Amino acid sequence: EHRYEPHEIERRWQQIWERERTWEVSNEPDGAPRSYVLEMLPYPSGEPHMGHLKNYSVGDAVAHFRRRNGMKVLHPMGYDAFGLPAENNAIKTGKHPRVATEESIASFQRQFRSWGISIDWSREFGTHEPRYYRWTQWIFLQLFERGLAYRKEAAVNWCPKDATVLANEQVIDGHCERCGTAVELRQLEQWFFRITDYADRLLDDLDTIDWPQNVVTMQRNWIGRSEGAEVTFSEAETGREYSVFTTRPDTLFGATFFVMAPEHPDVLKLAAGTEHESAVREYVNKVLTESKEERADTDRKKTGVPLGRSVVNPVNGEKIPMYVADYVLMEYGTGAIMAVPGHDERDFDFATEFGLEIRQVVDGGEDAELPYSGNGPLINSAPEFDGLGNRDALEKIVDWLDREGKGHRSINYRLRDWLLSRQRYWGCPIPIVYCDEHGMVPVPEDQLPVELPDIEDYAPQGKSPLAAAEDWVNTECPICGGPARRETDTMDTFVDSSWYYLRYTDANNDDAAWDKKVLDSWTPVDQYVGGVEHAILHLMYARFFVKALADLDLLSAQEPFKALFTQGMITRDGAKMSKSKGNMISPAPYVERYGADTARSYILFIGPPDQDADWNDEGVEGVHRFLARLWRLGMDVADGLGAPQPLLGPLEAPEGDDLELMRKAHWAIDKVTNDMAGRFAFNTAISAVMELVNEAYRRREAVSSGTLHFATATAASLIFPFAPHTAADVFEKLTGDRVWETPWPDADLSLLERDVVQVVVQVNGKLRDRVEASTTASKEELEALARSRPNVLAHIDGKQVVKVIVVPSKLVNFVVR
Ligand code: ANZ
């Protein structure tokens, strides 16, 4: 009696893979087709969770499948090791972030090994290691030299609790994403990457990659390209010009007021000396505490105050009143708008609230209600434009503005430059020094890396904690040797993760970030796998890096990730797992209890992996029983054989049970192959193998030993991408071969071509259904089959069947009364 002992099995195979470095691939060209399969690198904080198990189980299945289809697969691993959580934890516990991070990395390494993930460990690194961030700094300098990294004073989101600058996307509803504290605005000198230079390419190239539609849409919206015009209005008394960005210059004659963002630098100047001055001041101060999301919310009651001034509309000379209102944002367009309440909802709400004129200038037909945003002929505008279709009028009006010097076509993006500096300790130092004589000076390449010093007090103080490390800060100017100070800000961790997948291709290169030929031979990543929470920022930043580096001729790809798969979450009782809900489960106890093969197979079995799925302990048991049955069957068959045997070739005219089991085996090969080739239908692939194993058990006494051997070894071979240890064990016992060195099996499709035909089912001569049936089915079988169909039943139920006409392979007709 064989007992399935997953731990022994798993340890044994893991040792073999480790000893033989099975999953390492060389960069040497050898003609084999290559595939780069990558899961997003983990953020090492604490222990791996279920999301990690799912992520790496998906990626590993893809990697194994591709290898056995003849590809040389690069499947590396690393750690996104810098960042706030480690640092905040350090401040709380007194444990240095490096120590805490490295402990966590050790735990990830242990668990990845215990899961048997097929990783090329020779390329592993943490982004906090100087041998990695030396090149992060080098890339920064390449971008700096090309003007793609620059410094400017900017109003930044400041978290008073974390005492750091936050990127816009780290501000959720006006609060810090990490600690929930209300975010403030501050003016600081900050470093930026000029990602906006790439807006159009980032948009256009979305068409060249195979990504989920929702991710593409999120990228598109984040870039937010709008075509329109800039139109210049002038203040009635001073003649000072203010331009607006509008997507609807066709509605210019419907502009009945003008609105400025509260942050607009001229707002207070304009109101000065008017009766509204103090109201404006008060309003502006109040708005500064609101979040962007609140302000952009169209459902909110509109607020604002008059500036006591007016501007002149360039198309008709009309004077319209100026307001300041929070629904106009400073970061978009010019920070001022022409308001067209007849056709814009926000303007309409504002006009209604403040009793301002609402003028319709596009005719929407009889049923159109204001605000009307559709197309139609212009009305109430000017004789030369009235009656023209508004799209047509738009072009003509912009042409006119252009000729008069009062406006021009313009394109606006929502995308902002990437603010990358952080006033924090645990990050990659920015390799810049400041010299009184020479100003901002890049650290010469041969002095990289600028190492992050080990300091005692890394708690934030409003400026970077590095500023207090006097020994480190004070340095020499690389140009004159005079006294200079180091930049004390560190880089956003998104910088580290924007290029790690490039470094994997040449991870041990000490002379360069990578060798271009080597990098080009692997990139772009063929299949990237990760969480949809990275759908915007990480992916956008990585895409920007690749494009910028391609422009510097450092690589050839235009996109980092050719195909992307985003996995769904693992939930418990339908709820997201979280520490606060107390419903967290981690993979380790399951791996300890059932083995990694069970945990991995189960997490892929619970449902389509792109969807959320509920973890259920009974389901785990079920998968465990299946693997145990397969393994025991394998051992029994091996016992019967005495010695391993090569896999059976095509059978000559099998019959009866042999034929049925061979058919099932080839059906499973076909099914699993189709579920995996270009798809991620692992759940149905696994259940096909379960069916095969059931069929083998059912027919084990009736079939020849060769057939049973083939069916069992095939089940092992097919389950290998999900349960590699158990599969390797069974396959080796049966065949003497290593399953990962065995090519993926081919289905013999001729066995699958069962002679099935479509049989028409009628009731009183009317078509009610079609059924599939074997050409050899008897008249009785066909009638029974036809009677089982709901739509047929519905038409014969309660009636008397007076006659049944059956034409084999063609038709069943019930005559009823
Ligand atoms: C007049 C108008 C008439 C507009 C109309 C729309 C409809 P998208 O498409 O997102 O680019 N706008 C411009 N700058 C703004 C700012 N800083 N804050 C808030 N709103 C701003 O939006 C462009 C439109 O949003 C612009 O076109 C402008 O309103 C408004 F029937 O101008 B429109």
Image (cartoon, grey):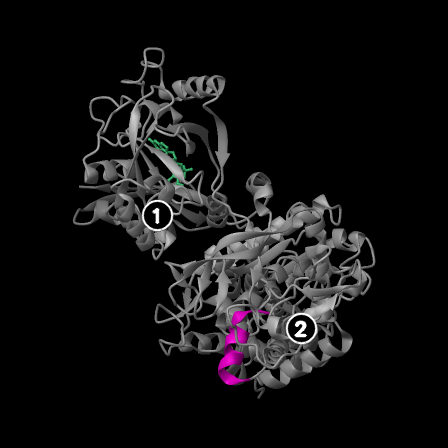
Q: Is residue 751 left or right of residue 365?
A: right
Q: Is residue 16 left or right of residue 779?
A: right
Which residue occupies the extreme front position in the image? 273
Q: Earlier in the sequence, mark 1 or mark 2?
A: 1
* Residue at x 49%, y 40% (from the top left corner): 413
* Quadrant in the rendering for residue 36: bottom right
**Mark 1 vs ligand 1: CB below 8 Å:** yes
Does 88 appear in magenta? yes
Q: Main secondary structure of the magenta part?
A: helix
Amino acid on which the number 1 mark rests in the picture: Ala
Instruction: Kindly identify which residue carries mark 1.
Output: 296
* Quadrant in the rendering for residue 482: bottom right
x, y percent for residue 361 = 28, 22
Instruction: Kindly identify which residue carries mark 2.
Output: 731
Amino acid on which the number 2 mark rests in the picture: Phe
Query: Over which residues does the magenta segment extend?
Result: 82-94
x, y percent for residue 381 = 31, 18
